Image (cartoon, helix red, strand yellow):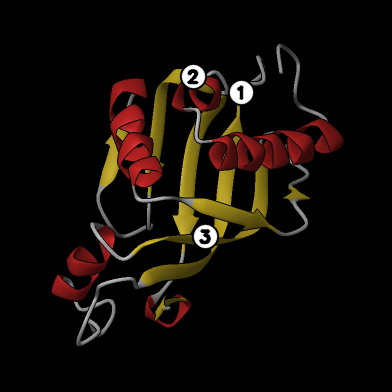
Amino acid sequence: MGTGLTSERDRKELALEHCRRVNAGDVDALLELYGEDVVFADPVGGDEGAGLRALRAHYEEAFAAGLRVEPGEPVAAQDGAHTFVPVTSVTDYAPLGPRFAERGWLVPPDDPSGKRLRRTCMLLLRVDETGLIREARTFWGRSDVDVID
């Protein structure tokens, strides 16, 4: 995924490649898609992070919780930079479930053992002229997260 990823088709492919690398669970391969000064938020309105080190920590925690994603059809904006993709993700209930419950984003299960979190979101990626992701934000609300078996 080298240089010049500004066409709509290339940005859509980048969004799908991002999801493939998430599912591979390889944080090094995933971070190859990002610029050093990346800014990210999951969810928008939650805590924001910046830089590859913070993004690495974010994904290492998610991968440890068994993160899997199922992307929908990406949509590329006409601005040459932004792409949106609907994503459904599933992780173990911990560690995010208790944090979400603490923030009032979901009702905790009586017995969290064996439970998983499912979230439906819109992933926004902003790509620079070199084809690297400089911004990644997920948009989701309380009604988009639930606890599953």
Which residue appears at 31% of the width and 60% of the height?
45
Q: Amino acid at mark 2?
A: Gly
Cα separation between marks 3 and 2: 23 Å
Residue that badge 3 annotates = 89
Cα separation between marks 1 and 3: 26 Å
Residue 63, image x, y percentages: 40, 42
Which image quadrant for residue 54? top left
| Up/down of 100 relative to 44, above or below | below
Ranked by sequence position, the earlier of labels 1 and 2 is 2
Residue that badge 2 annotates = 35
Which image quadrant for residue 96? bottom left
Which residue appears at 46% of the width and 50% of the height?
67
Relative to residue 103, is residue 26 drawn left or right? Answer: right
Element assignment for label 1? loop
> Between 42 and 30, which is closer to the camera in this rendering?
30
Q: Work out which residue is located at the far front of the displayed protein and give it.
A: 114
Q: Amino acid at mark 1?
A: Asp
Which mark, by number, is residue 128?
Answer: 1
Q: Quadrant of the C terminus?
A: bottom left
Q: Nearer the viewer, mark 1 or mark 2?
A: 2
